[in-house]
Image (cartoon, helix red, strand yellow):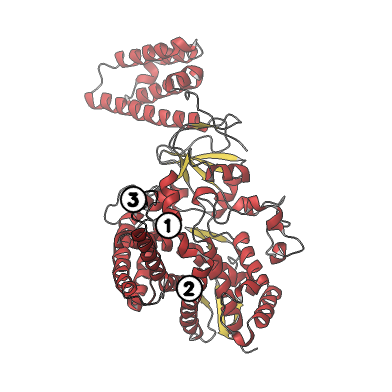
Amino acid sequence: MSHSKPLESSQGPLAYLQSNAGFVASTVVALGVAAAIVTRDAASKNAATVSAAIQNSTAAPQGFLMTQIDALSKLVDSHLDVTPLTFKLAIAVLVLGAILLLDQINYRRRKQSLPGPKWVPPLIGFFYDSVNPKFEGYMAQWNLGRISFTSVFQHFIMIGSDNDISRYFFNTPGSFVPCLVASMKTIICPDNFVFLGGKAHVEYRKSLNPLFTPAALTSYLPLQFESYQKHVDMWLENKGKSLQYQIPIRELNMDTSLNVFCGKYMPDDVRMKISERYYDITAALQLVNFPFAFPGTNVYRAVQARKYIVSEIQKCVVLARASMAKGNPSTCLLDTWLQTQLAAKAKADAAEDDENFVPPRQFSDAEMALVVLTFIFASQDASTASVTWMLQCLADNPDVLAKVREENARVRPNNEPVSGDNVKDLVYTRQVAKEVLRYRPPVIMVPYAASKDVVLEDGTKIANGTIVIPSIYPSLHDPKVYANPDKFDPDRFGPERQEDIKSPRNWLVFGHGTHLCLGREYAVSHLLAFMAYISMRCDWKHNRTAESDDITVFATIYPKDQLHLEVTERTA
């Protein structure tokens, strides 16, 4: 894999101008001509001046700037009789032209020889593509090569499509740090633990690991099934009517998350309002957004949503803390977390005389509320996308659904709940969950930012501040690793083929390195458990449209038609 080394000084603007004298000189002359046109009759008076300037544009780099300045001075001298307003307009044209020229020069200099657009829309770059992302556009960018280049609002972006370079971006914390999207620090707070680096990040994550142990995940299953039953009951009230199910799935996921995280401490009406308000956070997840939280902007609405959600979660933390102090049993993630802290505090009190003892971290109510928001942020859209694709893939592959049902009937006779005792035996169901995540990974790429100047082994220079994007989708659709990668095929993870075991480096569904998704096992558990539940309770028919197989991007990826289903009670 490529390694970084100190970046030599990037080519400065003057050096670039000198090495591209012909191009720049011709452009400067063109600006002079434009200014002359603005001043009306300059074209006829100064043909000789312009011609001489063009001839001199091929002169030695050291003298071309003086040549152009002299030529433009003659243009100005010949127009001393123009009106002040006309002259000001000419100067404005020159200044604007110079700004646009330097914008393109800077882009070309940073782009180097990487594949990507040769020119960018002035100043704003490909901003429209950022706020209206198309999956086909991402595919086209990935197909350009191992690393490609683009720019949005002066944010220079390198997109990695090769598995090795993506892993390198993910797992070189000394050079690249997560930046999510440009506005994300404003939205989910600059002091959020996801923005920590180095040892501080590692220690913070370590203190959260007890929330996602196998025992903890098993304890959450009854809470998950409460939400599954409540929402599927509502789906069945539609009596098989064909509806778009992406939004109902989104509501199910939010309710499940809040039930697992906050349990009985959060009322149903608050859960519904959080589900509605969280949409404002999702809507602000463009790669580059309007940078300030001004009223009326997506970022402003997202910040207001975050404040409301955190305040409601903090109320739950207060209630949970009081309950755990009384010695009540754990009923949700907050309870588990507080029990862990109480046990750690008791251990610290007992070891207070031990100079070598390092007391574990204790979290305030506000810190806990912000962490729970972060869990929601990490899971809500990704899980919604995964469940949506799971229902579509099973409906479109009835043979796979039949195998899922056969396994669940055998492992869970009489429709017993999924539990810690039987979940390990749902082998094929887990294969299907993994294939859904590979076939349609909910997160297709994760923005990072260079924290210093870096140069790769092939000579590619990455300047400090450049956004680098390790791409997940190409790694999971690599034909060298996954046979027929565009086919939904859970058997690829079966005991005979074991494509995941043979090439584990390509499994980037949950990222890689120090920021590997903390709740990855919970995400798989949720997808598996809901698949087990709905496959035994419901039948569903997929009413395909012309857009069923098209992919739309809204923070994560979804079927473009939002999944038209007819859901009915299962009779067989």
Secondary structure of the residue carrying numbered label 2? helix
Residue at point 49% right, 58% down?
518
Q: Residue 511 at what x, y percent from top left?
A: 54, 52
Nearer to us of marks 1 and 3 is 1
Nearer to us of marks 2 and 3 is 2
Residue at point 49% right, 82% down?
229
Q: Residue 377 at what x, y percent from top left?
A: 42, 60
91 left or right of 500 in image: left
**Separation of disc 1 and disc 2 at Cα?**
19 Å
* Quarter of the figure that contains the C terminus: bottom right
Mark 1 or mark 2, earlier in chain? 1
Amino acid type at image mark 3 = Asp
Mark 1 or mark 3, earlier in chain? 3
Which one is nearer the viewer's eye here, 65 or 179? 179
Secondary structure of the residue carrying numbered label 1? helix
Can residue 380 be seen from the camera position used here? yes
For disc 2, the marked residue is: 220
Residue at point 31% right, 57% down?
303
**Separation of disc 2 and disc 3 at Cα?**
28 Å
Secondary structure of the residue carrying numbered label 3? loop
Nearer to us of marks 1 and 2 is 1
Amino acid type at image mark 1 = Ser
Relative height, residue 458 to residue 252 (above, below) = above
User: Which numbered tag is attached to residue 207?
Assistant: 1
475 left or right of 195 in image: right
User: Which numbered tag is attached to residue 191?
Assistant: 3
**Separation of disc 1 and disc 3 at Cα?**
17 Å
Relative height, residue 427 to residue 38 (above, below) = below
Relative height, residue 73 to residue 133 (above, below) = above
> Image quarter for residue 52?
top left
Amino acid type at image mark 2 = Tyr
Q: Residue 325 at what x, y percent from top left?
A: 31, 72
